[in-house]
Amino acid sequence: MPTVRLSMSEPADELLSSDPLALLIGMLLDQQVPMEKAFVGPYVLRERLGHDLDARELAELPSEQVAELFTDRPAIHRFPGSMAGRVQALCGHLVEHYDGRAEAVWADASTGEELLRRLSALPGFGAQKAKIFIALLGKQYGVQPAGWRESAGTYGDTGAHRSVADVVDAASLALVREYKRQAKQAAKQS
């Protein structure tokens, strides 16, 4: 079992390291908030539920109840209502296609292309997020089906500091943030 450092909170990182559903939810939440906030979200959700995360339970709870879990102070995300709906949709997809098992999305994927297709089909996972998640799985979880680096695009590059896939400590987080700042600056100039 890997030990990731994505939330910079020991209990939240332990959950991300051991619970594939928490990892998927954290990746889903990783938009328009700092990475640490996104990846601590599954831990906060688990604490509010009072037990381990379960895709079937989250999919079947009334949407108002899921929204309440996200909006209680402090809110789990900057956009708690919409993210509650996205997490519930993700869990519903996992129940429908993977018997509620998040790890089944990648456990038997034989190629990077197949893994990319599976991840891209998840609610809330666009092409870029799917590629970043492939890189995260490959670099930090040892999930490396044939062609995974190619399917991850530049996020799969060795020695890169482009995304959450490359964050292993505070120093690498700073490098990723600098890369993103420079990319944003370059985009403004073009």
Image: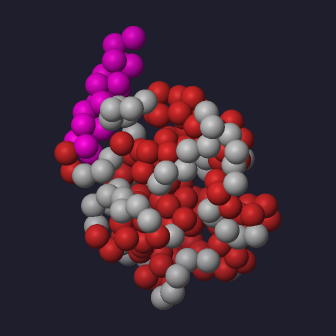
Marker count (numbered): 0
Q: Residue furthest left?
A: 171
Q: Is residue 138 above or below residue 98?
A: above
**Residue at position x 32%, y 58% from top?**
5
Q: Quadrant of the N terminus?
A: bottom left
Residue farthest along the top direction in this orientation: 190
**Could you say where residue 122 lies in the image, as x and y percent from the top left?**
68, 51
The answer to whether 113 is drawn above or below residue 167 in the figure is above
Q: Looking at this view, is 66 or 183 the one in front?
A: 183
Q: Residue at x 67, y 68 (%)?
A: 101
Does residue 183 show up magenta in the picture? yes
Q: Which residue is drawn at the image coordinates 62% and 62% (left, top)?
A: 103
Quadrant of the image containing the C terminus: top left
Identity of the residue drawn at 25% across and 33% down: 178
Instruction: Report x, y in % for residue 85.
Output: 63, 63
Q: Nearer the viewer, residue 75 or 129?
A: 129
The quarter of the picture where residue 84 lies is bottom right
- Colour scheme in use: secondary structure
Q: Is residue 187 magenta?
A: yes
44 and 149: which one is in front? 149
Residue 38 visible in the current orientation: yes
Report x, y in % for residue 92: 73, 66
Question: In the figure, is residue 22 to the left or right of 168?
Answer: right
- Of all residues, the one furthest to the bottom in this rendering is 50
In the rendered image, residue 169, in percent from the top left (x then y), is placed at 25, 52
Indicate whether 188 appears above or below 39.
above
User: Residue 174 lies in what quarter of the image?
Assistant: top left
Q: Is residue 15 left or right of residue 175?
A: right
Residue 42 seen: no
Q: What secondary structure prevails in the magenta region?
A: helix
Part of the protein shown in magenta = 172-190
